[in-house]
Image: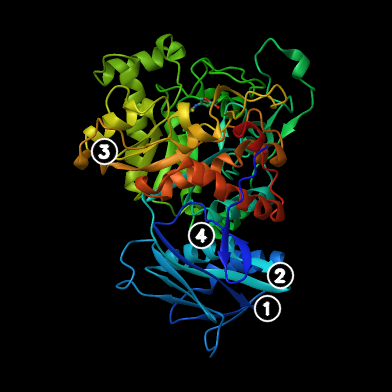
Amino acid sequence: MLLLAVFAVSGKAQIAVRGIIPQPLVVKNDHVVYTFPLHLAIGLGDDVDADNLTFFKSYVRSLTGVEPSVNNKMVYPNVWLQLDSNGVQAKEGYTLTVKRNKITITGHDEAGVFYGLQSLAQLLKISNGKLTLEGYDISDHPRFAYRGMHLDVSRHFFEPAAIKKWIDLLALYKINTFHWHLTDDQGWRIEIKKYPLLQSISAYRDETIIGHKKDSPHRFDGKRYGGYYTQDEVKDIVKYATQRHITVIPEIEMPGHALAALAAYRQLGCTGGPYKAATFWGIFDDVYCAGNDETFTFLQNVMDEVLPLFPSKYIHIGGDECPKTKWKACPKCQKRIQDEHMKDEKELQSYFIGRMEKYLNSKGRQIIGWDEILEGGLTPGATVMSWTGEEGGIAAAKQHQEAIMTPEKYVYLDYYQSLYPEEPLAGGGYTPLSKVYNYEPITNELSGEEAKYIKGVQANAWSEYMASPEQAERQLFPRMLALAEVGWSSKSNKNYADFLKRLRYQQPLLKRLKVNAANVFDEIID
Ligand code: TNX
C-alpha cells in the first residue's frame, strides 16, 4: 500500500501539510508552525452568536482535553471571531488567518463564522503538549447554496442521539441541508397527535431487516421493529441543526410509498385494505387514493402538525415511484379524472401534488418533490429533486424552475462503494468514492442563465441495508466527504488525487469522533 502523506519543510521540523475538506477557494500557507495553548481562549466580536461554537468547543475538548473559554470582552484571545459583511462578500463566506499569536476568523454572516471554525477544527493538531497550526491564510465561500444530505429513517430507524452525531458531521463538512425522509412503506417515523394509530401501528413492521425481495424469507427474523420521533424530539433535533447552520427539510411521502400509513388508516387506500407496513424493499401498488377527499384532509392535518416543527422554506412531498394500477381500477379516482377534465392517471398525480402544493403555499411554504412531479406537468414554484438521472433537473432548469441534483448513478450512498466480496450487502448500484467525487452538477446542456436554477447537490442515504448507525457510517463515510466537496468547492479547485491526500488527514479526526468510516484506501491504491 502506498503512503500518501506529503511532507513539507518548516523551520527545522518536517511537518505534514494538512488539508481541509471541502477544499477552500484560496489557501495560502507560509509553512511556519505556530503554537497555541491547549486551553484556547476565544474572543467574540460584536454580535457574533456564541451558538456557532457549540460543536467547535466539544471538538477541541476531544482533542486537547480542555474546553476553550469563550468571552466577548477578552483582551488577548487566541482565536478572534468577527463579522464583516463588506470585507467578506459572499454569503456563508469567511476568511481564516493564522498569525504568530492569533487566529482570526471573519465571517460574511454567522454561517461564515461557523464554517471558518469548521476549517480551523480540521487544521488543529497536538504536538509536544501544545496545539499547533501552520500559518494559513484562507479565503473561502461555497459554490452552491444548497448542499444536502438525505437520510432515510423509515427503512431503519436511528435514535435521536445518532441523528445528532450525524448532524455534527454534516456541519463539520459544511453541508447545510438535512433532508429527513420520515415516512415510507416500511415505517412512519414522526408523531402526529391527531392520528395516534400512526404511532401505534404505522411506526412498526413485523421484521427487523428489510428483505432483499419478497421471496427471501430467510432474511426475516419475525421481530416487531420500529420507532418514531416524538414532536419534542423533532423540535430538539431541528434546534440542534439550526445551531449548526443546517436547515432540516422534512419529507412526507405521497401519493406513493404510503403502505405504513395505510396500515393504520385503511380508508385512505383505493381498496380499503387491509394493508401492512412492508417488510421488504419494493414499489407497492397500494398508494393514497387520489379520488378520496379524506386523503387530502388527512395529509393537510399531518402538515398542520409538521409545519410548526420545521421552519424550513421547503417541504418535501415525495412524489416518486407511484404506480397507477389502483387508481386505474378505482371508481372515485376515475370520477375525479372526469370531473377535473384530466386525460389520465399521470395528470391525476399532478393534480394530487398540485393540490398539496397549494395548501402548503397557503401556509407560506414551497414544495420539493422527486423528479416524477414533472409527470403530467410541473406545478409552478415547485423544486425538482432530480434522482433518476439529471434529465428531471435539466428539464426544470430549462423551465426556469429550481432543481437539486441527486442522480442515483453518482450520489446514491446506499449503493456499493467497492467490489470487494467482503463489502456488506448494499443497494443495487456502484458508486465508488471517485465517482461521487467527480460528479459535476452543472451539465453542458444548460445555458449560463439556466444553470442558475440548479441550486445545488445532495447525496441520498436510503437505509434498506443500514440497520444500525455503525452500518450507516460505514456506508456513508468517506463518500459523504466527496459529496461535501462537490457542493462547496469551486470546479477548478477539484482534484481527486489531492482530495485523497486530504482524506488521509481526516482519518484520525473521524476516529476521534468515533465514526465507523470504511477504509477505502486499500481499494483506491494498488
Ligand atoms: C428508489 S430514490 C427510491 C427509494 C429506494 C431507493 C433505493 C427514490 C426517490 N426512491 O424508495 O429506497 O431507490 O436505492
User: Which badge, 3 or 4, comes first in the chain's sequence?
Assistant: 4
Q: Which residue is mark 2?
A: 64
CA–CA distance in space, label 1 to label 2? 8 Å
Q: Which mark is residue 39?
A: 1
Q: Which mark is residue 242?
A: 4
Q: Is mark 4 within 8 Å of ligand 1?
A: no
User: Which badge, 1 or 2, comes first in the chain's sequence?
Assistant: 1
Tell me if I can see residue 181 in this picture: no
Which quarter of the image is occupied by the N terminus? top right
Q: Amino acid at mark 4?
A: Thr
The answer to which of 142 and 1 lies nearer the viewer is: 1
User: Which badge, 4 or 2, comes first in the chain's sequence?
Assistant: 2
Q: How is the image coloured?
A: rainbow
CA–CA distance in space, label 3 to label 4? 27 Å
Q: Which mark is residue 360?
A: none
Quadrant housing residue 213: top right
Q: In x, y percent, where is residue 109?
A: 39, 68
Binning the other alpha carbons within 10 Å of mark 3 as few (below 14), some (14 to 19) or many (20 upward) gives many
Look at the numbered discs 4 and 1 and tell me whether their residues touch, using CB distance below 8 Å: no
Quadrant housing residue 91: bottom left
Look at the numbered discs 1 and 2 and tell me whether their residues touch, using CB distance below 8 Å: yes
Seen at 73% across and 73% down, the residue is 129
Q: Which residue is mark 3?
A: 401
User: Which badge, 3 or 2, comes first in the chain's sequence?
Assistant: 2
State which mark lies toward you, 3 or 2. Answer: 2
Above or below 370: residue 100:
below
Q: In x, y percent, where is residue 468?
A: 71, 38
Seen at 70% across and 36% down, the residue is 471
Above or below 259: residue 488:
below
The answer to which of 209 and 444 lies nearer the viewer is: 444
Q: Is mark 3 within 8 Å of ligand 1?
A: no
Please state if 108 lies on the left or on the right of 273 as rendered.
left
